Image (cartoon, grey):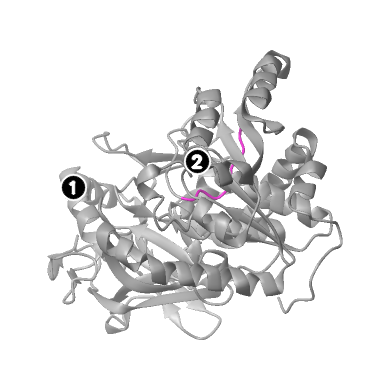
Amino acid sequence: MVNCLMIQGCTSDAGKSTVVAGLCRVLQRKGIINAPFKPQNMALNSAVTEDGGEIGRAQALQAIAAKVPSSVHMNPVLLKPNSDTGAQVILQGQSIGNLNAMDYHAYKPKAAQAVFDSFQILSKQYSTILVEGAGSPAEINLRQGDIANMGFAEKVDCPVILVADIDKGGVFAHIVGTLACLSESERNRIKGLIINRFRGDIALLKDGLDWLEQKTGKPVLGVLPYLHGLHLDAEDSVGLTKNMSDKHNSKIKIIAPLFPHISNHTDVDPLIQHPQIDFQWVRHNQPIPAADLIILLGSKSVVADLNWLHSQGWEKALHTHLRYGGKLIAICGGLQMLGQQLLDPDGIESEQTQTDGLGLMPYSTEFQNSKQLTNKQGSLNFASNANVCGYEIHQGQSNFADFPELLPAIAFCDGSFDGLISADNQILVTYLHGLFDSPSGLQTLLNWAGAEDTEIFDLTLFREQQINRLADCFEKHLDIENILQLASIEAGQNLESDH
């Protein structure tokens, strides 16, 4: 039998993804080969797995923390919202199309089968699985047919730890209220509590912790401090604190519009974290500042976000930016917006079958039913030894080959090419997510944009430092031995696997 432990949260953004990632690394340090698993995820940041499918970005990070290959079975159901009431449904790594909320409710039995099939597959490869819930288990309106929280835990007989965020206030009410909304069997399944993001003197919290344990009958397994400056790959939303315009030693100013339906915004993480880059998100109705480089990122609803750009005055701003010699990089959805036309005869992304693009590049894009999902390695085509690596996730196909007079942006190791560079060398477009992840590629792109002699920044090394910092914190502030006992996890207890 597989050892399984599920992390659920009192609220969204309670820290479930972070707790699972930290525990994945703690177990890995103890020699326990483990895998993350999230039955159902709703997120716009995704990644391409090593077995060629699409999962939530958080599960890809958790696999890195566990030091195991990512797999579609780590997140068998991924919902990528494209409106307030609908989403693209990714089942075991592949898109099955767009469904509105009611249609997905009817589809849930098939989604549930995929969830339990994937869990069984992982169970044959790993002796320990750390499961992440979604949102809160106390959402009464979502309990029927639940596969994301207690419905899954009850089905596979998995113990649960409940996480609550104290930073927002009301932590005791969150915990007690969540337990009150559960059935008796579900309450019994919760074996302990973790309080997350605590600031201050822990001694001042002791009376509250004693009351909580007495009131709920559940042990508090630890209080995690607020880790200032911790940065892990975001699952979805862009935090309000992620503008870095207070860097005093910056060598370049970079801005990016924050699309309403932005996806894979983790592409700019290396820029946000680089000590010499002044990076700024430009939000709804904010003035558009002058910059050296503008980046247009991915979008789950390209036409809707293109219309938003028009409404915010970005078309004029882009023309002014280029007229004064500024540089522009566009990735995936941003690439599609810069072209001549967006063609969608099958209504894959919107009801508009034909939409004019911004016209800054010569190609057009047509949305197709099949989705491109590939991991890629190569180099920037205008510089030597400028390596890039990343992944492609897109249904739009752009006709780059029709413009042989323009230099492709990237030459891949498999002999293929991607993207284009404008004739005046001011615009670079590509479908490659992770464009800035490689140190040499990042350095070359910063030089191209006008920033000379910047420090080398290695995102992979930075990510490892963040994960290890998280694991160090967990080992200090959580009752790890008790947590392992809850899931009957023993060091060195591993299955032979083919991963």
From mark 2 to mark 1, how far is it between C-alphas?
54 Å
* Residue 230 on the magenta segment: yes
In what quadrant of the picture does the C terminus appear?
bottom right
5 on left or right of 271: right
Label tally: 2
Task: Return the x and y of residue 347 as percentages of the image width and height.
Answer: 18, 71
Specify whether 219 is left or right of 78.
right
Tell me the kind of residue under disc 1.
Lys
| Magenta stretch: dominant secondary structure | loop
In the image, what residue occupies the spot 70% across and 73% down? 125
445 over 284 or under it: above or below = below
Going from N to C along the chain, the mark reached first, 2 or 1, is: 2
Give the percent coordinates (x, y) of residue 77: 45, 65
The residue most toward the bottom is 415
**Left or right of residue 315, residue 154 in this image:** right
Judging from the image, what secondary structure is the residue with disc 1 in? helix
**Residue 145 seen in the figure:** yes
Image vertical order of residue 377 relative to residue 265, above or below:
below
Task: Pinpoint residue 79: horizontal percent, then vertical percent.
Answer: 39, 60
Residue carrying label 2: 182
Residue drawn 50% across the image and 55% down it = 151
Closest to the observer, 354 or 141: 141
* Residue 92 seen from this side: no
Secondary structure state at the residue bearing disc 2: loop
Q: Quadrant of the N terminus?
A: bottom right
Across and down, in percent, residue 314 comes to 22, 47
Q: Which residues are magenta?
A: 228-235
Q: Which residue is mark 1?
A: 316
- Is 250 above or below relative to 260? above
Left or right? Give the position of 169 relative to 99.
right
